[in-house]
Amino acid sequence: MTPERRQELVLLRRARDLMDRRYAEPLDVAAIASSVHLSVAHFSRRFVAVYGETPYQYLMTRRIERACAMLRAGASVTDACMQVGSASLGSFSSRFTQVVGMTPSAYRAAEHTAEALMPDCTARTITRPRLSRIGEGRTTTAA
């Protein structure tokens, strides 16, 4: 890997980290590109090449993920929308439905047990009983 390519990856990672940290603030692609000293067009092209989605798609996906956590915790749809930085409840709901597969209200109303939120392979691994040694050679099962 060339030093130029490595530096470009560092800049793109910084931009992604900025979106992860400041997802609730009014960010646009121009501001993000400017923060890493790249032109908007070059930044967008390289971001798509490296991460497989546009910077805006990445930011909106992060916002939706944060909104999901808020909705599971009992926040209203409007509160979740405003807290993740969406200006419009309509566009937030449309994007949420597109990403999650159900409306924010339906998602909020659904039951969210921890195991249901995990991939099957992860849930099986975490909930599998394990033998642990306690004291002098005795074994018990521990979840």
Image: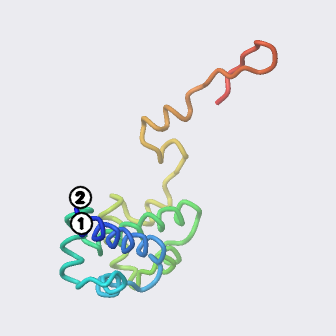
Q: Amino acid at mark 1?
A: Arg
Q: Amino acid at mark 2?
A: Met
SS of the residue at dot 1? helix
Vertical comparison of 78 with 114: above or below: below
Vertical comparison of 40 with 131: above or below: below
Residue 25, x across and y down, in percent: 46, 83
Q: Nearer the viewer, residue 134 or 66?
A: 134
What quarter of the picture does the C terminus occupy?
top right
Residue indicated by mark 2: 1
Point 35% across, 79% down: residue: 90
Point 53% across, 77% down: residue: 79
Q: Is residue 69 left or right of residue 1?
A: right
Residue located farthest toward the front when viewing the structure as drawn: 3
Q: Nearer the viewer, residue 124 or 102?
A: 124
SS of the residue at dot 2? loop
Residue 2, x across and y down, in percent: 22, 63
